[in-house]
C-alpha cells in the first residue's frame, strides 16, 4: 500500500477514529488522522470510569497514544477540519484546514505561559463548569502534549505576556491557518456524538437551576481531574451532595425531542449511582426510569447496583423539576408507574441522563452518505465513505472499538479497490 491512492484518511480523533487509524496502520496502511479539537481522545477523555468494571479510561488511552507515537505510518493533525472532499473509492481528494495552535513543537509544557495569562475562558473538557487560563494544556493526558493559545487573546497584550514568559521560543503568535491537500484511497468518518440539548426540555429545569446538571457534567464532577477534584458537591453552594436524583430519558424516547433510545444512558446512570455511593457511604440515590436497558453482560452490573439498599429505582416519567423554597433542595415530581401514585422527592442534586446525537446531525460530509431521520448514518451511499462508531448508532465504548476495527478493514479493502 505504497502509492498515494492507497492511503486512508480518518476524520475524527475520538476513540472510534483512533481505533480505526491504529488498526489500519498496523495492518500496513498509510493513515492520516484529523481532529478538530486540540487533542485526541474525544469524549472518552471526559469520562471518569467505564462500566461495568469501573476502571478509568486513562490506561486505555495511554496505550493507544503510545501505539500512535510508535507507528510512523500514522500522521496526526489536531485543530484540523475538512474544507472539501471529493472523488470516489480508491481516489479521494481532501482539502484540510489546519487551524493555528500558536504553540510550536518547542513546547515542554512548563506552564509558564499559563501562569502569566490572566484571561479566563470556559473549560470545554469540563463542559464549562469551571474556567481556565486562555493559555492552556487541554487536560493532563492531552495528545499531543502541548499547550494552546486561545485565538481570542492573540493580538492582545495578554498574548505578548505569554510570549515573553516562554523560555523555549514555543509561542508563535504569527501562526496562520494553513491548507493541506491529500489524495487518499478511502475515508473513515468517525465524528462521534454530541449530548442532546436538554435545555429544550424546559420542565426539567436545566439552565434554570444550577443544581440540575447533565449526565456528562456529572461524569466530570466525579472525576479526580474534574472541576472539583472529584468532590461531588452542589454547584449552587459547594455543599457535599447527600442525595441525588438520576432522571432517565431526559428528552429521549420523546417525539418532541429525541424519539429514540440511546441505549447506554441507563448503564451510565447506574455507574453514576456507584460514584456517589463510593464517595459518600451515607448518601441516597433515587433513579427514575422508563425501562432499564442493561443487555447481556451488563445485567450483572444492573443487579449489583440494584441490590444497594441506598439506591432506590422507581419506574416513573418525571413531569417537573423545581426548587423547594423552604428547604432549598430540588423537588422532582412524577408518577410511580408501579404503584399508580404520584411521586415527589427532595434531593440535593438532579442529574439528567441525556441522549446521544450523532456528529453527522450537525456536520455532514460533502460526499454522499445515507442517513436516518435522526442523522445517524445508515449506509455509505454512492460515495463509499466508511462510517465508524457513534455516527452509525448510539454505542458504548466496547462496541465502538469493534465497529471501528471493522471500519479499518473495510477502509483497507476500499483503498485497494477490492
Image: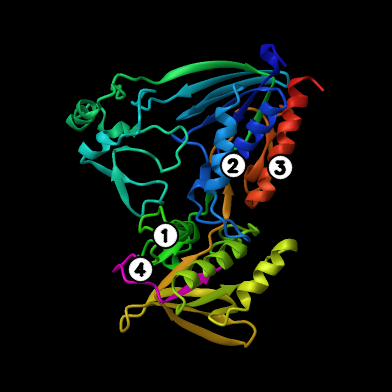
Judge the density around disc 3: few (<14), some (14-19), many (≥20) Cα neighbours within 10 Å.
Answer: many
Which of marks 3 and 4 precedes in the sequence? 4
Which segment did they paint magenta? 233-249
- Whether 409 is drawn above or below 306: the answer is above
Q: Which numbered circle lies on residue 234?
A: 4
Element assignment for label 2: helix
Point out residue 185 in the picture as x, y percentages from the top left corner. 69, 20
Element assignment for label 3: helix
Task: Give the residue at mark 1.
Answer: 221
Residue 146 in view (yes/no): yes
Judge the density around disc 1: few (<14), some (14-19), many (≥20) Cα neighbours within 10 Å.
Answer: many
- Whether 280 is drawn above or below 361: the answer is below
User: What's the CA distance linking mark 4 and mark 3?
Assistant: 38 Å
Which of marks 4 and 2 precedes in the sequence? 2
User: What's the CA distance linking mark 2 and mark 4?
Assistant: 31 Å
Which of marks 1 and 3 precedes in the sequence? 1
Task: Give the residue at mark 2.
Answer: 15
User: What's the CA distance linking mark 2 and mark 1?
Assistant: 21 Å
Judge the density around disc 2: few (<14), some (14-19), many (≥20) Cα neighbours within 10 Å.
Answer: many
Element assignment for label 4: loop
Q: Main secondary structure of the magenta part?
A: loop
Residue sitting nearer the eye, 260 or 76? 76
Judge the density around disc 4: few (<14), some (14-19), many (≥20) Cα neighbours within 10 Å.
Answer: some
Task: Give the residue at mark 3.
Answer: 403
Point out residue 72 in the picture as x, y percentages from the top left corner. 59, 21
Which of marks 1 and 2 precedes in the sequence? 2
Which of marks 2 and 3 precedes in the sequence? 2
Amino acid at each position: 500500500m505504497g502509492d498515494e491512492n492507497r492511503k486512508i484518511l480518518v476524520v475524527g480523533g475520538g476513540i472510534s477514529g483512533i481505533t480505526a487509524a491504529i488498526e489500519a496502520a498496523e495492518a500496513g496502511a498509510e493513515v492520516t488522522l484529523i481532529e478538530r479539537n486540540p487533542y485526541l481522545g474525544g469524549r472518552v477523555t471526559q469520562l471518569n470510569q467505564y462500566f461495568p468494571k469501573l476502571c478509568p479510561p486513562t490506561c486505555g488511552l495511554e496505550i493507544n497514544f503510545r501505539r500512535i507515537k510508535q507507528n510512523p505510518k500514522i500522521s496526526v493533525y489536531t485543530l484540523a477540519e475538512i474544507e472539501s472532499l471529493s472523488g470516489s473509492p480508491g481516489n479521494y481528494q481532501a482539502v484540510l484546514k489546519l487551524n493555528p495552535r500558536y504553540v510550536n513543537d518547542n513546547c515542554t509544557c512548563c506552564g509558564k505561559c499559563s501562569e502569566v495569562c490572566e484571561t479566563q475562558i470556559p473549560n470545554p473538557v469540563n463542559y464549562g463548569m469551571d474556567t481556565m487560563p486562555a493559555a492552556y494544556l487541554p487536560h493532563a493526558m492531552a495528545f499531543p502534549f502541548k499547550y494552546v493559545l486561545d485565538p481570542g487573546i492573540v493580538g492582545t497584550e495578554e498574548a505578548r505576556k505569554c510570549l515573553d514568559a516562554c523560555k523555549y521560543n514555543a509561542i508563535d503568535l504569527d501562526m496562520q491557518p494553513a491548507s493541506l491537500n491529500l489524495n487518499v484511497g478511502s475515508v473513515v468518518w468517525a465524528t462521534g456524538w454530541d449530548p442532546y440539548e436538554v435545555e429544550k426540555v424546559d420542565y426539567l429545569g436545566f439552565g434554570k437551576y444550577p443544581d440540575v446538571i447533565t449526565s456528562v457534567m456529572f461524569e466530570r464532577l466525579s472525576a479526580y481531574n474534574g472541576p472539583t477534584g472529584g468532590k461531588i458537591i452542589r454547584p449552587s453552594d459547594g455543599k457535599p451532595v447527600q442525595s441525588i436524583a438520576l432522571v432517565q430519558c431526559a428528552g429521549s424516547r420523546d417525539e418532541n425531542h429525541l424519539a429514540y433510545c440511546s441505549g447506554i444512558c441507563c448503564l451510565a446512570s447506574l455507574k453514576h449511582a456507584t460514584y456517589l455511593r463510593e464517595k459518600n457511604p451515607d448518601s441516597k440515590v433515587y433513579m427514575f426510569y422508563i425501562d432499564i436497558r442493561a443487555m447481556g453482560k451488563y445485567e450483572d452490573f444492573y443487579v449489583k447496583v440494584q441490590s444497594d439498599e441506598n439506591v432506590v429505582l422507581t419506574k416513573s416519567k418525571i413531569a417537573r423539576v423545581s426548587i423547594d423554597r423552604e428547604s432549598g433542595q430540588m423537588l422532582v415530581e412524577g408518577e410511580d408507574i408501579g404503584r399508580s401514585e404520584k411521586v415527589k422527592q427532595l434531593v440535593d442534586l438532579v442529574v439528567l441522563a441525556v441522549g446521544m446525537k450523532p456528529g453527522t446531525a450537525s456536520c455532514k460530509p460533502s460526499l454522499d452518505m445515507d442517513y436516518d431521520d435522526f442523522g445517524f448514518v445508515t449506509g455509505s451511499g454512492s460515495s463509499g465513505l466508511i462510517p465508524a462508531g457513534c455516527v452509525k448508532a448510539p454505542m458504548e465504548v466496547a462496541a465502538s472499538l469493534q465497529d471501528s476495527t471493522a471500519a479499518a478493514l473495510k477502509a483497507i479493502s476500499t483503498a485497494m479497490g477490492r
